[in-house]
Image (spheres, coloured by chain):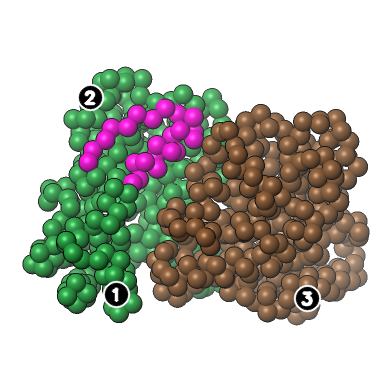
Chain colours: A brown, B green
Amino acid sequence: MARPTVGHLDPSFVAMMDDLKDLLRSAFRTRNAMTLPISAPGSAGMEACFANLVEPGDRVVICQNGVFGGRMKENVERAGGLATIVEDPWGRAVDPQKLKEALAAAPDTKIVAFVHAETSTGALSDAETLCAIARENDCLTIVDAVTSLGGCRLEVDAWGVDAVYSGSQKCLSCTPGLSPVSFGERAMAAATSRTTRAHSWFLDVTLLSGYWDEGAKRAYHHTAPINALYGLHEALVLLEEEGVEKAWARHRRNHEALRAGLEAMGLAFVVPEAERLPQLNAVTIPDGVDDGAVRGMLLAEHGIEIGAGLGALAGKVWRIGLMGHAATQANVDLVLAALKDCIG
Amino acid sequence: MARPTVGHLDPSFVAMMDDLKDLLRSAFRTRNAMTLPISAPGSAGMEACFANLVEPGDRVVICQNGVFGGRMKENVERAGGLATIVEDPWGRAVDPQKLKEALAAAPDTKIVAFVHAETSTGALSDAETLCAIARENDCLTIVDAVTSLGGCRLEVDAWGVDAVYSGSQKCLSCTPGLSPVSFGERAMAAATSRTTRAHSWFLDVTLLSGYWDEGAKRAYHHTAPINALYGLHEALVLLEEEGVEKAWARHRRNHEALRAGLEAMGLAFVVPEAERLPQLNAVTIPDGVDDGAVRGMLLAEHGIEIGAGLGALAGKVWRIGLMGHAATQANVDLVLAALKDCIG
């Protein structure tokens, strides 16, 4: 990222863009042509999916089991759509049976949206099953893979995901600020056959494709964040060199080590074992322990930042990330020793 | 930007955010509380202004004299507004008399929008006069200062600009990817008293203020692009150290040197002298000279990229940037020598 900035139409940069798309396809396990990084953080990737696929009056079923389902609802409504919320408890995976029932009750539903890996709770949902149910009901799917991409199994093509977005700063270990997205053929058909224009010019995939497509004229749309894209390219090269399946296994292995250590300290996981996300470990704060004091001491004395609880879990849990480059045995040992020191 | 990434709520980062806002206020010459960098390129800053201020049915007069006025129209229409275009020739400043007439003909106009420094043509418009006309007609103003911020006089408070956006990669000499914006009290009053929600969640200033305001709870909105913001902070420190008025004078001085050299080579400026933007020098390509061949040779043999013509000026002009850190006598000498070599 510290290399000199070149022009956003420089031939060397255009070659890197093509390479970047191939690397992203490999990480997403897709052959989708429309696979690229949105020039803004994950929240903008989410907005890119909803703004392009939701037209006024469209019904969208959102399976909500944490903070980010609520943000999806905002996106649907701001695009003029009608959101139906299917709720599951915070800390649990999405229940496929509830989705089936919701779609039976609302046969006019166009899109099903859910979060694959809920960063706010550490729950991992069965995206393959949820996408199959959506497809059986002739619905498109929008999947939040912000924390899953590169950290646990994600199979965009094999599972039939129609639109997916992620973030550069989670299991890809890049700096924050970019949002990889991928749109399948059905999603692109929906985006290009809209009867109304998408609300966002900046995020309009029909315009973005004119700059990013291999076959296109590389028409100027917006100035790409050149140096940030250098960083994402390198992060994806590192993932490709390790191999994405090996990266998933590494996250799982280090999660098991962390789990053993946390449980030995008497800390209990929020999420049942079968629904647990390896890269985000949410544990209940023990009675009598001061949340803010422990997190402050971890940061000040050990240089370790762990996440506070969000939404319904605020003040009740800690969220310990074990993502990308940071998912190592050495870091597991370090955070366990530091936590022991801070809890006393 | 190569420094370690810290958390977006890390105390050290929050302190830097406050510092960054003060530096931006100094560059924009404003005391506006709502002055911050949007986490995406200039096109998203444009969208932030229109998405927050335009409600369905609102009339917006756009003074168009180049590419970016056309993009404003897209933004107005996608926000549900009604755009009235006041056209001036490409390569000329906006004519204040035409704006007066347009506002007299459409007294229900809510917003006047124009580009201060048209990057596509090199024309500089009289923002002070245009803002005064808008204010007399009780209209808000949205001003595109992508290429003017840091490069020529821009006085957000003294001129009464209501909402303004810029880019990190022009005269601030930072990497591309961030868009400094500033909203005055009248603009914030319009944004907070909307009867409909802004169509963009990511760009909603009422939500952004919860994260960026000094007095706010620093509520998580989206993950800030930490390392890119380090870069913008440093770019603004450099501008502050030089002094913004001195930076304007430096751009003017080096433009004069470039102008003398280009005219000595027989190259004619597109824009009349009084309306000329120092930091973007558009000259007509001489008859018989191959546009693409010259630009390709400049890049390949001299490592210099100059801009092609855009829109109505495609294939007819070259656009030579002289922005920020690059606006030096040494660079003027370099580009003149290289151009002589390539034109032959």
Real-space Cα distance between discs 2 and 3?
Answer: 67 Å
Whether residue B17 is in magenta: the answer is no
Q: In which quarter of the view is residue A268 placed?
A: bottom right
Q: Which residue is denoted by mark 2 in the rendering?
A: B101
Is residue A316 at least partly visible in the picture?
Answer: no
Instruction: Give the image location of residue B247, x and y in percent.
Output: 24, 61
**In front: label 1 or label 2:** 1
Mark 1: amino acid: Met
Residue denoted by label 3: A246
Q: Residue at x 41, y 68 (%)?
A: A10
Q: Amino acid at mark 3?
A: Lys
Q: Chain of mark 3?
A: A
Q: Secondary structure at mark 3?
A: helix
- The structure residue drawn at horizontal position 30% and vertical position 79%, both measured from the top left corner, is B301
Query: In the image, which disc is placed on residue B297?
Result: 1
How crowded is the residue under tag 1: few (<14 C-alpha within 10 Å), some, or many (20+)? some
